[in-house]
Image (spheres, helix red, strand yellow):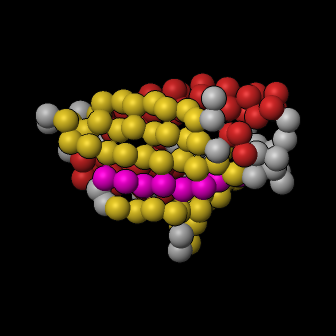
Amino acid sequence: MNSIERDIFIAAPVERVWQIVTEPEHMANWFGDAGASRAGDTITVSWAEHGDGELRIVREDAPHAFAFRWDANDAGIGDTLVEFTLATEGDGTRVKVVESGWGELNTSPERQAELRDGNASGWKHELGDLERYAQTIAV
């Protein structure tokens, strides 16, 4: 399988969820755990356990689509594409995330699957953090 797909419902307006998903000051609280900053089209997110990750923004269509490329966990093997789609659903927002490109990574099929499986569980965790964080703040 070449992609990971997850979605979650957030009980907040799409504009609020857009800010939480795309702005570093919010990303540092649900996606990373040790800070985030933006310089131009690059957001650097930090994790205490994993170090820094660079998110190279390739699409920003507020408040409905946000996409970035980032390196796989192994340096030098390529990157994957992460796409967020936000859609109004009743009084809230449906957030869908798709991460693709695993089959194009320059490594063995076994390592591609291992990296994909790690991120699949990671997205489940991160979207849970997103939902909890969105419920605790007022934007």
Could you say which is closer to the camera, residue 4 or residue 95? Answer: 4
The residue drawn where x is 23% and y is 33% is 11
Residue 114 in the figure: left or right of residue 84: right
Task: Please check the rendered image and state whether residue 113 is part of the magenta-colored stretch, yes or no.
Answer: no
Direction bottom: furthest residue: 40
**Number of callouts:** 0
Residue 130 drawn at (x, y percent): 42, 36
Placement of 108 over or under 105, stated as above or below? above
**Left or right position of 67 against 109:** left
* Residue sticking out furthest to the left: 90
- Regarding residue 72, the answer to whether it shows in the image is no
Q: Which secondary structure type mostly characterizes the magenta part of the structure?
A: strand
Above or below — where is 52 with respect to 3? below
Query: Where is residue 103 drawn, in percent x and y?
Result: 71, 39
Q: Which residue is at 63% across, 29% downward? A: 1
Q: Quadrant of residue 128?
A: top left
Tell whether 41 sits left or right of 60. Answer: right
Q: Residue at x 25, y 39 (%)?
A: 93
Tell me if residue 70 is in the magenta stretch: yes
When asked about the image quadrant of residue 3, the answer is: top right
Percent x, y of residue 96: 39, 38
Q: Would residue 84 be visible to someone looking at this image?
A: yes
Q: Which residues are magenta?
A: 64-71
Of residues 51 and 78, the one drawn nearer to the viewer in this rendering = 78
Q: Quadrant of residue 131?
A: top left
Q: Is residue 127 left or right of residue 39?
A: left
Residue depicted at x 45% and y 39%:
97
Front-lying residue, 70 or 129? 70
